[in-house]
């Protein structure tokens, strides 16, 4: 009896410690976000007086107005939407081609070519930064959104190939062979039979690609010079350079820049996480 | 075997893009690293391995390499082990686990630019939350300009990056825990093993592959980090937070030494390559078994 209560007490105490630990970590993880959110809704003079932690009472929206009117953040947003939409959809479209080829077709060198593409997933972009800068310069594509789209298609191809190859591999071969007997070409099989089945994989990819391209900073830093062609990550930094001590509008710009990925995260969390796991662990 | 024509139809366009963006530039980078190109002029000289020899005697390079090593060290201690710990804690069916997990994932959706910016609200010397909290707690002597002090700049940047990286580690460990065999855990518990013993002797060995994947990704991400350093310190003050990527950017795009910048980038590639090989061998072996 006493052993039983002792055990129970121990279990409850263990649970309490566990909960406390988790709550502490979650608290620590939320502090930086809290600082940014509260700062975005406060006036600069109040921030300079009290620091970055006080609650916004009453909350003001001036910083958001500044971010749009003086920071022209809507231009950066539009540029980023253009780059992200084109680069993400084209890299996924090309990925369905490679995915189908590596997952369903049988040909020589299949393994080698597959590895060649997949290895690009971990390729440090710094290695091709200078040659691509030179290439785009030669073709007068520096300072254009097209250059960004091209780069992101190339760097997106490995993850798209990886996920769609493993997806198409899991679809039974009989589906393809029976369609072939009915006289379908591989293009028809991919378009009519395989793609509709691949919706979950395509959604996960769209989300991953969207997040990565949206958040990219290195390529616009190197390839874009004119402020009207900058993407949002650069624009946010630009705002910091121009209005050194305008903490409030910087925080507001950060929040605006994060809203799209935040929405994706809130409504598509399952796909996002499944995609990340598949991308890292699956062959 | 399928007909060659069909394969070519499917692979031609993707490979054309891949060649243009990654393969050909990669070889060009090897060539450029053996020149003294300044990024602007049409003429440049072939200098052989001079840039690589210079890499080895450049104190800034070795300094950056050490900073990368410190980064990897902190990354392996803090986000990786914390990620495992959180995964184990949240894998149990506790109330609110979904919300707790979301909170840890949340920083992952922030770009490194945003992470750098919002951590400024923590580190700012006079208004920042960290110094204000230290003051309030009576540790006034510990307050400092975290990003402007050469002793603390690098670690401050890495901590901000680690905040973002922990979620990925946790996700991967949670996925790994799904495939741990519960019957073995139960058997061990019936045999009277303590919880800690069960974890270290039964659960952890089964997480071996997951751990290698997480460690590889962590090391690669640590080596590739650029944005957050550029945003928070630009490698300063006095290069105290300089890493290979920022050094490469500085040499190539600010000092216009494209040849030397290429050499630094290729050294980075060689280091990453070692990790990639280990990673691939693990992932492939798992697939065979």
Image (cartoon, rainbow, N blue to C red):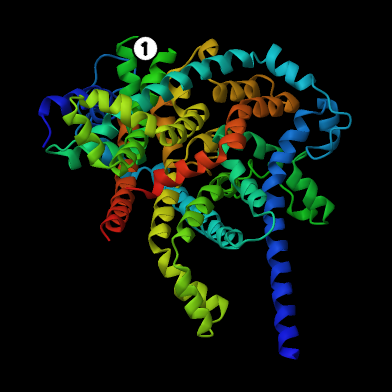
Percent across and percent down for residue B171 are 51, 51
Residue A128 visible in the shown view: no
Q: Residue at image x 51%, y 32%?
A: A211
Q: What residue would you read off at disc 1?
A: A141
Which image quadrant is residue B82 in? bottom right
On screen, residue A213 versus residue A36, left or right, reads left
On screen, residue A109 versus residue B139, left or right, reads left
Q: Nearer the viewer, residue A176 or B89?
A: A176
Judged from this view, the residue extending furthest toward the front is A182
Q: Residues within 10 Å of mark 1 (few under 14, many from 20)?
A: some
Q: Nearer the viewer, residue B7 or B16?
A: B7
Which image quadrant is residue A74 in? top right
Give the chain of mark 1: A
Count numbered badges in the picture. 1
Residue A248 visible in the shown view: yes
Position of B273 relative to A72 (above/below): below
* Quadrant placement of the N terminus of chain A: bottom right
On screen, residue A191 versus residue A229, left or right, reads left
Position of A30 relative to A73 (above/below): below
Q: Nearer the viewer, residue A44 or A108?
A: A108
Q: Residue at image x 16%, y 26%?
A: B6
Q: Residue at image x 85%, y 26%?
A: A45
Percent across and percent down for residue A202 are 42, 32
Judged from this view, the residue extending furthest toward the right is A58
User: Secondary structure beneath disc 1?
Assistant: loop
Which image quadrant is residue A97 in? top left
Position of B279 relative to A80 (above/below): below
Percent across and percent down for residue B35 are 24, 28
Q: Residue at image x 38%, y 17%?
A: A147
Percent across and percent down for residue B186 are 50, 76
């Amino acid at each position: 009896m006493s052993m039983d209560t002792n055990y129970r007490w121990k279990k409850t105490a263990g649970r309490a410690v566990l909960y406390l630990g988790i709550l502490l970590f979650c608290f620590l993880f939320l502090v930086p976000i809290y600082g940014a959110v509260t700062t975005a809704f406060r006036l600069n003079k109040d921030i300079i007086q009290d620091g970055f932690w006080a609650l916004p009472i009453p909350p003001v929206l001036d910083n958001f107005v500044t971010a749009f009117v003086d920071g022209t953040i809507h231009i950066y947003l539009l540029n980023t939407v253009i780059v992200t939409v084109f680069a993400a959809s084209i890299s996924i479209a090309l990925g369905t081609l490679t995915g189908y080829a590596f997952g369903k077709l049988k040909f020589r060198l299949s393994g080698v070519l597959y590895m060649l593409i997949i290895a690009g997933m971990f390729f440090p972009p710094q290695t091709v930064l200078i040659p691509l800068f030179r290439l785009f310069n030669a073709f007068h594509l520096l300072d254009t959104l097209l250059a960004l789209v091209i780069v992101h298609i190339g760097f997106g191809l490995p993850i798209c190939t990886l996920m769609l190859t493993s997806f198409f591999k899991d679809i039974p071969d009989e589906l393809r062979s029976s369609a072939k007997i009915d006289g379908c070409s591989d293009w028809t099989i991919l378009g009519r039979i395989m793609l509709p089945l691949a919706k979950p994989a395509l959604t996960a990819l769209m989300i991953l690609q969207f997040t990565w391209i949206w958040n990219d900073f290195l390529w616009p830093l190197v390839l874009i010079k004119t402020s009207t062609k900058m993407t949002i990550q650069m624009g946010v930094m630009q705002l910091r350079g121009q209005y050194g001590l305008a903490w409030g509008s910087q925080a507001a710009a950060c929040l605006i820049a994060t809203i799209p990925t935040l929405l994706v995260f809130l409504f598509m969390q399952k796909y996002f996480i499944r995609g990340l796991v598949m991308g890292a662990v699956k062959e | 075997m399928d007909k060659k024509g069909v394969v070519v139809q499917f692979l031609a366009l993707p490979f054309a893009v891949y060649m243009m963006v990654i393969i050909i530039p990669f070889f060009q980078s090897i060539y450029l690293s053996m020149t003294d190109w300044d990024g602007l002029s049409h003429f440049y000289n072939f200098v052989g391995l001079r840039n690589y020899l210079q890499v080895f005697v450049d104190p800034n390079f070795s300094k950056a390499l050490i900073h990368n090593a410190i980064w990897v060290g902190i990354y392996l201690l803090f986000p990786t082990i914390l990620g495992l710990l959180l995964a184990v804690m949240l894998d149990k069916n506790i109330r609110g686990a979904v919300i707790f997990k979301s909170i840890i994932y949340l920083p992952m959706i922030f770009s490194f630019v945003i992470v750098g910016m919002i951590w400024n609200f923590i580190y700012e010397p006079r208004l920042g939350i960290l110094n204000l909290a230290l003051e309030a707690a009576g540790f006034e002597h510990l307050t400092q300009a975290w990003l402007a002090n050469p002793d603390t700049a690098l670690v401050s940047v890495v901590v901000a990056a680690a905040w973002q990286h922990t979620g990925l580690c946790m996700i991967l460990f949670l996925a790994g825990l799904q495939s741990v065999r519960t019957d073995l855990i139960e058997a061990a518990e019936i045999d009277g093993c303590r919880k800690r013993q069960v974890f270290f002797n039964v659960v952890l060995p089964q997480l071996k592959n997951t751990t290698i994947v997480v460690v590889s990704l962590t090391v690669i991400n640590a080596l590739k980090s650029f944005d957050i350093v550029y945003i928070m310190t630009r490698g300063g003050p006095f290069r105290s937070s300089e890493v290979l990527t920022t050094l490469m950017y500085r040499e190539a795009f600010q000092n216009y030494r494209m040849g030397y910048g290429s050499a630094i980038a290729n050294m980075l590639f060689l280091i990453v390559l070692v990790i990639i090989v280990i990673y691939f061998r693990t992932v492939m072996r798992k697939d065979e078994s």
